[in-house]
Amino acid sequence: MAYLVWRKLWRILGLIFPLLYIASDSKKITFLFSFYVLCFFLLIELLRFFNSHFNSWLFKRFKLILKEEEINRVLNTTFFLIFLNLAIFFFRKEIAVYSVFFVIFGDIASSIIGRYFGRIKIRNKTLEGAIAFFLMCLFIGYLLNLITPIKLAWVAVFWAGLIASIVELFSIVDDNLSVGLASCIVMEIILRMFFSR
């Protein structure tokens, strides 16, 4: 249980990026900050893949936030940072912000519900977890529209959340990357099709 809590708290730290984007209202500042953080993690990746002792030390030191299966592959956090940089660089502000919130809170919801209430297994995930992901996206979308200065059409929130939850369930690529980009693309398509933005 402690492991799950620490991993989710670590994930919540990712909110620094969209909150900075909202507060600064600057794509450049947010992107540069996220890019520097990504570069730091890429350096960590290089060091640990070329130095097994450093890799072992890293996983012992941060065992509460790292998964055992990550020891021989790219970290989930690095995939998240790659998605984050792509979202900020290529997509408009509201899409980048909403997608990051979806990835963070959708993942938390699906992990908790899937772990403790999941019964219907699909690959290594559960249907209950996917439903929780979708419902969390709807809730987060509602809250963001309610309390932040950036707004996103409800139809875009709905379809982005739905597609993101399906991708999270079936993705063969790390879901920190695939889910976020899928939600960005869906939101962009919806806005272009129905709102000419």
Image (cartoon, grey):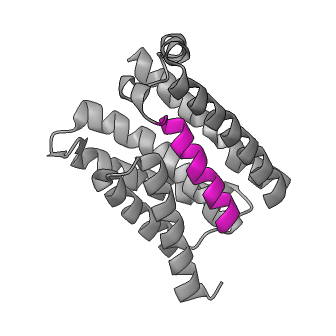
- Residue 90 image position (x, y, % from top left): 65, 67
| Image quadrant containing the N terminus | top left
Range of magenta residues:
74-90
Q: Residue at x 65, y 53 (%)?
A: 85
Task: Choose between 72 and 174: the one closer to the eye.
Answer: 72
Q: Does 83 lie within the magenta span? A: yes
- Location of residue 167 (image quadrant): bottom left
The answer to whether 38 is drawn above or below residue 195 in the figure is above
Task: Choose between 171 and 74: the one closer to the eye.
Answer: 74
- Residue 59 image position (x, y, % from top left): 48, 17
Q: From the viewer's perspective, is 127 left or right of 63?
A: left
Is residue 26 visible to the viewer in this orientation of the structure?
Answer: no
Q: Residue at x 31, y 37 (%)?
A: 113
- Residue 9 image position (x, y, % from top left): 55, 28
**Main secondary structure along the magenta-highlighted residues:** helix
- Residue 21 image position (x, y, % from top left): 76, 53
Q: Residue at x 38, y 51 (%)?
A: 173
Task: Choose between 39 and 21: the one closer to the eye.
Answer: 39
Task: Choose between 2 and 171: the one closer to the eye.
Answer: 171
The answer to whether 193 is drawn above or below residue 124 in the figure is below
Q: Does 189 lie within the magenta span? A: no
